[in-house]
Image (cartoon, rainbow, N blue to C red):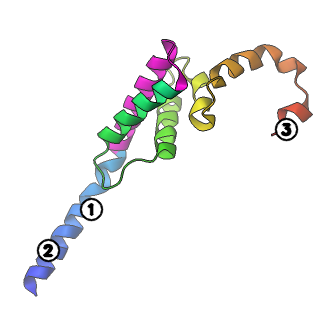
Amino acid sequence: MAAKRYQLMALALGLSCMGSLPADANEAGDKGAEIYCFMRKTGNSHNVSWKAAYERIKRQGNGLFKTSPKHAAVMMTESVVTAQDKFRDCGKYLGALYSGSETAGKDFDAGLSNESSTTDDDRYSY
Protein backbone atom coordinates (compact mmCIF):
# COMPACT_ATOMS: atom_id res chain seq x y z
CA MET A 1 0.00 0.00 0.00
CA ALA A 2 2.81 2.43 0.85
CA ALA A 3 4.56 1.59 -2.41
CA LYS A 4 1.48 2.58 -4.40
CA ARG A 5 1.28 5.84 -2.47
CA TYR A 6 4.89 6.65 -3.38
CA GLN A 7 4.26 5.77 -7.00
CA LEU A 8 1.27 8.10 -7.10
CA MET A 9 3.30 10.89 -5.46
CA ALA A 10 6.09 10.40 -7.99
CA LEU A 11 3.58 10.49 -10.84
CA ALA A 12 2.01 13.67 -9.46
CA LEU A 13 5.44 15.26 -9.10
CA GLY A 14 6.32 14.30 -12.67
CA LEU A 15 3.10 15.77 -14.01
CA SER A 16 3.57 18.98 -12.04
CA CYS A 17 7.00 19.42 -13.60
CA MET A 18 5.34 19.62 -16.99
CA GLY A 19 4.52 23.24 -16.15
CA SER A 20 7.64 24.25 -18.06
CA LEU A 21 6.07 23.22 -21.36
CA PRO A 22 4.84 26.69 -22.34
CA ALA A 23 8.44 27.98 -22.48
CA ASP A 24 9.34 25.01 -24.66
CA ALA A 25 6.29 25.70 -26.80
CA ASN A 26 7.37 29.32 -27.25
CA GLU A 27 10.82 28.17 -28.32
CA ALA A 28 9.33 25.65 -30.74
CA GLY A 29 7.04 28.34 -32.18
CA ASP A 30 10.00 30.68 -32.61
CA LYS A 31 12.07 28.02 -34.37
CA GLY A 32 9.17 27.07 -36.62
CA ALA A 33 8.51 30.72 -37.48
CA GLU A 34 12.20 31.28 -38.25
CA ILE A 35 12.25 28.35 -40.65
CA TYR A 36 8.92 29.18 -42.28
CA CYS A 37 9.66 32.88 -42.74
CA PHE A 38 13.19 32.32 -44.03
CA MET A 39 12.04 29.75 -46.55
CA ARG A 40 9.13 31.88 -47.79
CA LYS A 41 11.35 34.97 -48.13
CA THR A 42 13.82 32.99 -50.20
CA GLY A 43 11.14 31.91 -52.67
CA ASN A 44 10.01 28.52 -51.41
CA SER A 45 6.36 27.54 -51.66
CA HIS A 46 4.01 27.48 -48.70
CA ASN A 47 3.81 23.68 -48.69
CA VAL A 48 7.56 23.11 -48.56
CA SER A 49 8.08 25.85 -45.97
CA TRP A 50 5.20 24.61 -43.82
CA LYS A 51 6.44 21.00 -43.87
CA ALA A 52 9.92 22.04 -42.77
CA ALA A 53 8.63 24.31 -39.99
CA TYR A 54 6.06 21.80 -38.74
CA GLU A 55 8.62 18.98 -38.63
CA ARG A 56 10.86 21.20 -36.49
CA ILE A 57 8.01 22.03 -34.12
CA LYS A 58 7.02 18.36 -33.77
CA ARG A 59 10.59 17.35 -32.97
CA GLN A 60 11.05 20.23 -30.53
CA GLY A 61 8.09 19.18 -28.40
CA ASN A 62 8.83 16.88 -25.52
CA GLY A 63 5.28 16.39 -24.29
CA LEU A 64 3.22 13.26 -24.33
CA PHE A 65 1.30 14.30 -27.42
CA LYS A 66 2.38 15.51 -30.85
CA THR A 67 1.65 19.16 -31.61
CA SER A 68 -1.29 19.43 -33.98
CA PRO A 69 -0.88 21.37 -37.23
CA LYS A 70 -3.44 23.95 -36.07
CA HIS A 71 -1.62 24.51 -32.79
CA ALA A 72 1.70 24.76 -34.63
CA ALA A 73 0.25 27.46 -36.90
CA VAL A 74 -0.96 29.40 -33.85
CA MET A 75 2.45 29.05 -32.17
CA MET A 76 4.19 30.39 -35.27
CA THR A 77 1.71 33.25 -35.63
CA GLU A 78 2.18 34.24 -31.99
CA SER A 79 5.95 34.25 -32.48
CA VAL A 80 5.74 36.48 -35.55
CA VAL A 81 3.31 38.90 -33.91
CA THR A 82 5.24 39.04 -30.64
CA ALA A 83 8.65 39.57 -32.27
CA GLN A 84 7.77 41.70 -35.28
CA ASP A 85 11.27 43.17 -35.50
CA LYS A 86 12.76 39.69 -35.68
CA PHE A 87 10.29 38.50 -38.33
CA ARG A 88 10.10 41.54 -40.61
CA ASP A 89 7.87 41.15 -43.69
CA CYS A 90 6.73 37.70 -42.57
CA GLY A 91 3.21 38.72 -41.61
CA LYS A 92 2.09 38.62 -45.22
CA TYR A 93 2.74 34.87 -45.32
CA LEU A 94 0.75 33.98 -42.20
CA GLY A 95 -2.57 33.76 -44.02
CA ALA A 96 -1.30 30.73 -45.91
CA LEU A 97 -0.90 28.88 -42.60
CA TYR A 98 -4.66 28.96 -42.17
CA SER A 99 -5.93 28.85 -45.73
CA GLY A 100 -3.23 26.67 -47.24
CA SER A 101 -3.40 29.00 -50.22
CA GLU A 102 -0.16 29.29 -52.12
CA THR A 103 -1.08 32.81 -53.18
CA ALA A 104 -1.95 34.17 -49.73
CA GLY A 105 1.11 36.43 -49.71
CA LYS A 106 0.52 37.56 -53.30
CA ASP A 107 -3.15 38.30 -52.55
CA PHE A 108 -2.06 40.41 -49.63
CA ASP A 109 0.29 42.52 -51.76
CA ALA A 110 -2.27 42.88 -54.55
CA GLY A 111 -4.98 43.80 -52.07
CA LEU A 112 -3.00 46.81 -50.89
CA SER A 113 -3.00 48.39 -54.33
CA ASN A 114 -6.64 47.52 -55.12
CA GLU A 115 -8.16 48.31 -51.74
CA SER A 116 -9.91 51.46 -52.90
CA SER A 117 -11.78 49.53 -55.61
CA THR A 118 -13.12 46.94 -53.15
CA THR A 119 -16.71 47.40 -52.11
CA ASP A 120 -18.10 46.39 -48.74
CA ASP A 121 -20.14 43.66 -50.42
CA ASP A 122 -17.00 42.14 -52.00
CA ARG A 123 -14.99 42.36 -48.81
CA TYR A 124 -17.40 40.24 -46.80
CA SER A 125 -18.51 37.76 -49.44
CA TYR A 126 -17.11 34.47 -48.26
Quarter-wise, where is residue 33 in the image?
top left
Q: Residue at x 29, y 50 (%)?
A: 20
Q: Is residue 39 left or right of residue 1?
A: right
Q: Give the class, few, some or many, for how many residues have Cα within 10 Å of label 2's Cα (few <14, many ≥20).
A: few
Q: Which residue is mark 2?
A: 7
Q: Which residue is mark 3?
A: 125
Q: Earlier in the sequence, mark 2 or mark 1?
A: 2
Q: Nearer the viewer, residue 69 or 89?
A: 69
Q: Residue at x 48, y 43 (%)?
A: 69
Q: Quadrant of the N terminus?
A: bottom left
Of badges 1 and 3, nearer the viewer stands 3
Q: Secondary structure at mark 3?
A: loop
Q: Which residue is mark 1?
A: 16
Q: Which mark is residue 78?
A: none
Q: Secondary structure at mark 2?
A: helix
- Eyeballing the image, is 125 above or below 12? above
Q: Earlier in the sequence, mark 1 or mark 3?
A: 1
- Eyeballing the image, is 39 above or below 79? above
Quarter-wise, where is residue 113 in the image?
top right
Magenta span contains residue 56: no
Q: Are marks 3 and 2 in contact (CB under 8 Å)?
A: no
Q: Separation of disc 1 and disc 3 at Cα? A: 47 Å
Residue 29, given in percent of the width and then of the height, sits at 41, 36
Q: Separation of disc 3 and disc 2 at Cα? A: 58 Å
Magenta span contains residue 33: yes
Q: Secondary structure at mark 1?
A: helix
Of badges 2 and 1, nearer the viewer stands 2
Q: Which residues are magenta?
A: 23-46
Residue 52, given in percent of the width and then of the height, sits at 40, 28
Q: Is residue 15 left or right of residue 115?
A: left
